Every structure is written in C-alpha cells, then in structure tokens.
Amino acid sequence: MALPTYEEVIAKWDPVLGLEVHVELNTASKMFCSCATEFGGAPNTQTCPVCLALPGALPVVNEKAIESTILIGLALNCKIAPYSRFARKNYFYPDMPKNFQISQYDEPICFDGYVDVEIDTDEGPKQFRIEVERVHMEEDTGKSLHVGGATGRIHGADYSLLDYNRAGIPLVEIVTKIVPGTGKYAPEVAKAYVAELRDILRGLKVSDVKMEQGSLRCDANVSLKPIGSDVLGTRSETKNVNSLRSVERAIRGEMIRHAELLNDGKKVKQETRHFQEDTGLTRSGRSKEQAEDYRYFPDPDLVPVTPAASWIEELRATLPERPSLRRKRIKEEWNVPDKEMQAMINADVLDIVEATVLLGADPTKARTWWLGEISRIANDQNVAIADLAITPADVAQIVALVAKGELTDKLARQVVEGVIAREGKPAEVIEKRGIKVVSDDGALMAAIEKVCAEQADTAEKVRGGHLPAAGALIGAVMKETKGQADAAKVRELLLKHLGQG
Amino acid sequence: MIRNTAAQMADALAKGETTSVELTQAHLDRIAAVDGQVKAFLHVDSAGALAQAKDVDARRKSGEKLSPIAGVPLALKDVLAQKGVPTTAGSKILQGWLPPYDSTVVSKLKAAGVVIMGKTNMDEFAMGSSTENSGYGPTFNPWDLTRTPGGSSGGSAAAVSAFEAPLAIGSDTGGSIRQPAALTGIVGVRPTYGAVSRFGLIAYSSSLDQAGPFGRTVLDTALLHEVMAGHDAKDATSIKAPVPAVVAAAKSGDVKGMKIGVIKQLQGEGYQKGVQTRFDESLQVLASLGAEIVEVDCPSFEYALAAYYLIAPSECSSNLARFDAMRYGLRTGDVNGASAEAVMSATRDAGFGREVKRRIILGTYALSSGYYDAYYGSAQKIRTLIIQDYAKAFTRADVLVSPTAPTTAYKIGEKVDDPMAMYLGDVATIPVNLAGICGMSLPAGLADEDNLPVGFQIMAPAMQDQRLYQAGAALEAALLTKWGAPILSKAPELKGAK
C-alpha cells in the first residue's frame, strides 16, 4: 500500500500526544558539584571527583537549581511538593560516570500543572490546554562520540570518545499528561506548546533554551487510535527533535508512519525512534517492549528537598508576565498588525524590541530596525540577532537622532552597520566615519548650482518640465555632499532652483 | 615509647621530650618488625609519614599552636582517599589507583598535624567481618596469629593492638569498627551517622557508613574523634552541629546516677559463655560505681540482621556500579575490539571478590521491579521500627549496653564458607547503624575458655556521643584498677619484636 497522505491519516485516526521536554538550567555550577557549566569547553576540562564519580566522591545539591525548578513549576501552574526526594536510576552506560543517574522518581518536586496554547484553526484562533503531569530535576549525562562504523552508534564503532563536561549539568524534565483531542492540529499544538515553554523559560531566565545546542530537547510520544475509540494505541517515542519545526515534522511523520502500519493491519512497535533532521523521518532505536528495570531507589547520599512555603510564595511573587499575556498586551499597546506581530515572534525579537521601546524609541521604528536592517545583517552573517554587537540602547539612540533630523534613514543605516562592525557606539561611529547630515541650505545650494552647471543639458530638461531627469541631478548632488544630505531636501531645493518647486 | 598511649605521646611531644620524627620512626620500625606476621598494612608510606612528621616538628618549633594530637602517628583504613597514596578499599579493582584528592577526614588529620603512616587492610569494600575478604590476603590477630582480627576494619584494629600505631581510623557500616576493636582488645567508636564527613570514604552502604576512631584507651579514642568529626558542606548528610565534647567526657569518666539499659535481645542464647560472663561482670562494676542498671526491650532487633542484609547490599549494588574500567582502576578484556559492555563485564568479574559479587547480586535482586516493596521496602520499615525501639529505650536509660560480638576471635577460614555464620557475628552491632546512632566497644577482659579479648558495647542517642566516653572511661578506669595493668599487656609478644 502507498504511504497515506496526512489528510487520509486524520480522516481515519485520532492522534494522542505526550511530550517530554528536557531543559538544561543555566546555573553557574553543575547539579551536584561546583564545576562550571559553560557550553563548548575543551573536553573533560569542566570535571571534578564528583562528576567523574571517583571513589569516595559525594553529590551535594545545587540550591540555585532547586530555585529554578520551583520557578518553572510555578510558571507552569504546578503544585510544589513540600517534600520530595532524589532517586537513583541505575543502568550501565559509559557516558554516565556513576552508572546511575540521579533523578526524581515517584516524588517529583512539581506536579499537576498546565500550559495553555493558542493556534490558528480553520475556525479561527483556538486555545488548547496541555496538562503537565510533573516537573522534576535530574543530572545530564556526558557525551559519547562513536568513531568509525557506519552509523555513528556505539555498535560497530572502532572506539568511542567520552566528554564528561556535560555530566552533571542540571536538567529539568517537564512531562505532560497524555494530550488527546487535538485531531489534525496535533503537530501544530505540539509545536506551539514547545514554543510557549521556551518563551516561559526564557522569561524566567533559568535556561538558555537553545534547541540547537541541546539546552532544550523534546521527546515526542505519539500514538493513534481510531476516531471515536477510547482505547489508546501503541506509542512510539521520538528523540533528538532539536527545533520547533522538527517537533511539527516529527509528529506529522510519525502519524503517517503509524497510520501506514495500522492500515496494513500491522502493529506499531513500542520503541524509541530517532528523528533525522535531513529527511524528516525517524529511524528505529531501542525497543521498549520490555520495560527496562532501572531499580530506582531514594539516593541515600542526598537529603529530601523540603522548600519552605514562605520561600515558594516569595518565588511566586517574582514570576514574570506570562508570555501569551505579554504578547497580547504588546500587540495592543503598540498597535501591531497580526502579520507583523507574527514576524516579530518568529524572528524572536520581541524582548529586544521591547527593551528598545522602553529606552524611549517609537515602537514602530524600533520594530522596523530590528526586523529589517538588523535582521538582514544577522542573516547575512549567519548569526543570531542577540549575538550582534548592537544593543537596544544603540538602536534607541539612532532612532532619536533620526527623529531630531540629525541623521537621515540612509545615514542611520551606516551607523547601524558601523556599530555591528564593532566600530564603537553610535556617536563614535558617526565621529569616525564623518557622518553628518548636510542641512545647511547654503552648502546644499552651492552643490546644486555646481551640479546644474556641470550637467547643464539635464538641468535644462528639468527646467522644461521633464521631472524624471531630476533623479540624475539629485544623485550627483548626493555624491557631491558625500551622502550626507537629506535626499528629500535636495529634491525640494533643486526643483525650486530649476523653477519647478 | 610505642607502648605509651597517644595522650602520653602527645604530652611528650608538647614537652619536647621527643619529636614526631622520632616517634614516627619508632612506629615504622615496629611495622617493619612485626607486620610481616600481622599484615595490618596494605601500604606503608614511610617517606610521606616522615615528611609530615618533620613538618609538624618544624611547626611546633616555630611556636605554632597545634592540635592536641599533632605529631602522633596514625594508621588509616584503605577505604579513605588520600591524595597521591594508593587507595584500594581492599579490592583488586582499584589496584594502582592514586586519588587526586583528599577525603575530608584526611584533610582534617593533615590540618591537625596527625602523621598518616599508611593504609590498612580491610574486607573488600568493607564487606565482611574478618578481613578475610580482602583482595590482598587476610590480616592476623596479634593475640593469636591463627585467628582473624575481625572486620572489616581488621587492619586498623590489628595495627593498634600490635603497637604498630597508637591510633587508627576505621569505618563502621554494620559493626566494622566495634567488632574488630572487641576482637583485638582495643577501643573503637562508631560516631553518630553524619558526625564525620563521608566525603572521600569509598562507599559501601551510604546510609550506614561512618568513619570513626580506634585507640588503646577511651581518652585516646576521644582525642582522635574530636579531630576527625565536624560538619562538612561536601557531604549532604553531614550534621550541622558542634562536635560533642567527647574529650571532656573521657576525662571526667563518671557514671554516678547514670541509667544504663541492658538490651534483653542482645545477650544470653547465642553468646559465648566467657563473653557473657565478662559482660555481666562489667555491669556489676558499673553498678558499683553508682550507675542504675535497667533492662530494656527492643523487640524489632530480631529483624535487624535481615534488614541490614537487604539495605546494605541494595545500596552497594548501586554504589559499586562506578567501577567499570572506563575512568580508573583495573581494566581487563580490552582486546580485539571488545565492546565497552564486554570490558565492563570482564573487569568487574576479575576485579571483585566473591563476597562483593554476592552482595551486588543480592542487592540488584532486592531493588528489582516487583521485588522492591517486599525486600527493600520492608527492610526500610524494619529500620523505622528499630529507630522506635531505641527511642523508647532511651526514655528509660541514658546509654544502652550489650556484648559487642557474640564470640571472641575465631580461626581464619573457620566461617569463610558459611556467610550466614559470619553475618550472625554482627547481630549486636548492626542495630546502631540502622538507627544512625553512636556506639563504642571497649575491652571487658579475656574470656576464660580461650583467653581472648571480649568487647563491651555502649550505645547512645544521635549526637550524644559524649555519653559513650563518659560511661566508657568510668568502666575502663575501674577495670584497670581491678586488672592492675592494661589488657594488651596480656597479649603474647610477637616474633621479631624488639
């Protein structure tokens, strides 16, 4: 049978989702030792007896990680457990130094929350509630690099390299309850959920939430049941889903794959699958038909986590505005059209535009700069906007100079370029590049007269009413004033000079 | 000189009558002379010890204020990491490992100017009661070289008993300090759980392990206790409280008006006659000193051994998972492109001894899904009941007492093939570990039938360690008067001894 189309799948099958998101916290030190957590260090330079599991070493909980996890729980409308414990998840794997992972098992720190997301449907915007089962803390593993062999997997490799810099980095796992009832919108709901989580986490400043660096990772569980049925189908768990777009693609792809099997009367295997960014398909990983026995038990090296109710309330009071509410507020306050709003969200510039506006810039101007010229340069250089050397304060200053008439839009672009090229702050760039608006009518008139004399024929045509010819003269005047004149002003004076004003 | 107490040695050092170098050399000479028979040490760090001794002598000369036992030499159980000194926990799997860091106990000893002479033999990963489970051969009891010194800290106990060291450090998970102290005629204390940092103590059973001191007198033991204890931010289970005033208690040694509870379940049947006799006599001595003797009932102690042999193996099955040949220690089977899994398996097979494997398998089984509640879960409930038994008993008595071990030292090889018989030797010491409280063993004399030392155990509530020393010092003084000489003077001379 041929692969069913997505329309064929949703005509017959009802998808059920379950999402597990792992978030690396941005604490300065690891979950159970004082090693640095910075991304990208030389292999095994951010390690110590504790995270290498040397004999005798003991874990001690990072209080900041507990605080961050409670903040996440509160932001996801969870209850916070007055008593929770760490447990050991026992299994052997070379990238896990202790051969057990310290995690939380039946006593997670946060539980019973929800996240509301809104997506566009055929009937207009519609809200879906994703229920959060639990939020718990654990430690990340090290990284293995399997060298040789065709698959890059441990089996068949000639040898493996291990980097324990990541071992022990605090991870928070956010697990949803099963998400039924999303129908054909399942892939979009999942994407919107992960996007909303990302925005919430960013607002809390507890993680870098960079999916491409793995600081936010999503495992997507998908199963299908016949429409109208109450019986859940067998699920697959897709790992390695490293972008918002991939969340959508992976779920859509799995729905189609499941439907093909089920349509053929075959069974879906309960297994882990790995998402392939290049093909958008998943490949089979570990079989989960026989549940692994991790022999969980409370970690005797650690004491229970017992946050005081007063501390939880203090943390609750510091929660930032919920991202969805904030977007609604910004859209109304700044009077942003739908399409532009979406563009800002997609380009991830909401924070930076808001910071610019808070520094006094006009919202429309601020938005235009960040979404336009600055986004373009970031794209050309293939870097994130946030990594460019230009700040909201710089943009606010440039917007103010344009408003005062001290810069033209064209000159302002040169200043932006200069700031990004690390030539200095706007004032320094203006100084160094000798950028100045020629607003002195006398100087302008001198240039106009000079150009009209040099190009007498063209000037004559304009004088005779052939206005399009003025373009060449304006260009020449701009050149004469080294681009420092306001083109509109030049045009006005030129036409007046040639009797056309 | 080596037959003096640590307190006397410290005094001589303070008065300038001797130097730490001289004292340390005398002990190194003694080790060279007798350790071929006793085999208390796995590694003797002569150069390191003499360098430490020289350093502390210089500090003393410069007028620096030093700890009360600065310059006194000590033997360290091989379960504690010492930077740059071979540390094996008695296991072949760690042969050749040089720790890149100091355990907190070692840091404290160094800061106090205590001279660490070397690492002592032990049952592999502290699993055993006779030191026969060492990967490097057994230690022999200085009282009778055909017998075991007990275990798992048998090397440390034998070293102190054989005058190879005046002080030693052991660790006690189910009696591994108190039982060898009893079997070698010395004093050993297991402090309250959390009183001494476990950072750098190679874990056997995290919720039960606790390092503690050995000495030939109650006061010596207290002096070491005070140096090694105290809160440590590197151990999450470390207690944030001042160290109990154990030295002051050891110096006062008074039991007048003290209520002493005899645990009904820890005497009588199963206890060697000579052990029971010496225990009963000691009780009479305490009564004659003005203590009030009461009997207390601890019905759940019947299940303590069973609970221990589920909890300790469960924790060890996880704690010992890190010995996988990937980062340190032994690596075997790494040939012909063997997989990581195959190398891990071959290394663990070659590196662990029979008893360690037995406990790993037992613990793995007890934690398995479907068995957890029946085994590990039930054991934890028994633990709670034992805590309650103690709490109730301590409302009636200030300290509780029992014989430390049911028998005197047994022959090497006698119980090695009968784990259950070996485990039964821990019946009186294990409840202390399960409850997280403190306990001491001190000599109560020699059993009539075999002329071997008998241990008297004192137990006190958590962080009331000073009560052990107060009662222990009183009993010790009275018995010394009765005997006329310390018990170790009755031990046979070792061949090769000067």
Image: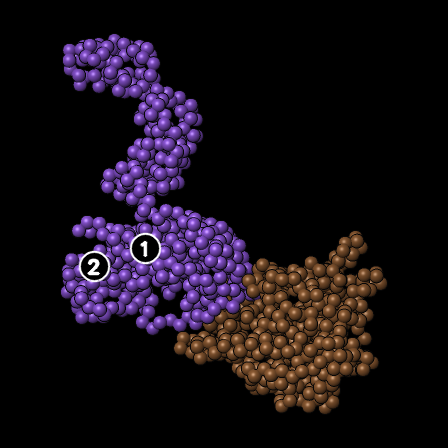
Chain colours: A purple, B brown
Q: Quadrant of residue B268?
A: bottom right
- Give the SS element for disc 2: helix
Q: Is residue A465 visible?
A: yes
What's the residue type where badge 2 is placed? Gly
What's the residue type where badge 1 is placed? Val
Marks 2 and 1: which is nearer the front? 1
**x 41%, y 57%: residue:** A172
On screen, B175 above or below A89?
below
Front position in the image: A288 or B304? B304
Q: Quadrant of the N terminus of chain B?
A: bottom right
Spot occupied by residue B160 in the image (x, y as percentages of width and height): 72, 73
Spot occupied by residue B49 in the image (x, y as percentages of width and height): 72, 63
Spot occupied by residue A393 in the image (x, y as percentages of width and height): 40, 33
Residue at numbered disc 1: A115
Q: Quadrant of the C terminus of chain B?
A: bottom right
Spot occupied by residue B133 in the image (x, y as percentages of width and height): 59, 78
On screen, B216 above or below B110?
below
Front position in the image: A255 or B394? B394
Q: Say which chain tag 2 marks.
A: A
From the viewer's perspective, tell me whether residue B43 is left or right of residue A271.
right
Q: Residues within 10 Å of mark 2 (few under 14, many from 20)?
A: some
Q: Say which chain tag 1 marks.
A: A
Residue at numbered disc 2: A183
From the viewer's perspective, tell me whether residue B462 is left or right of residue A475.
right
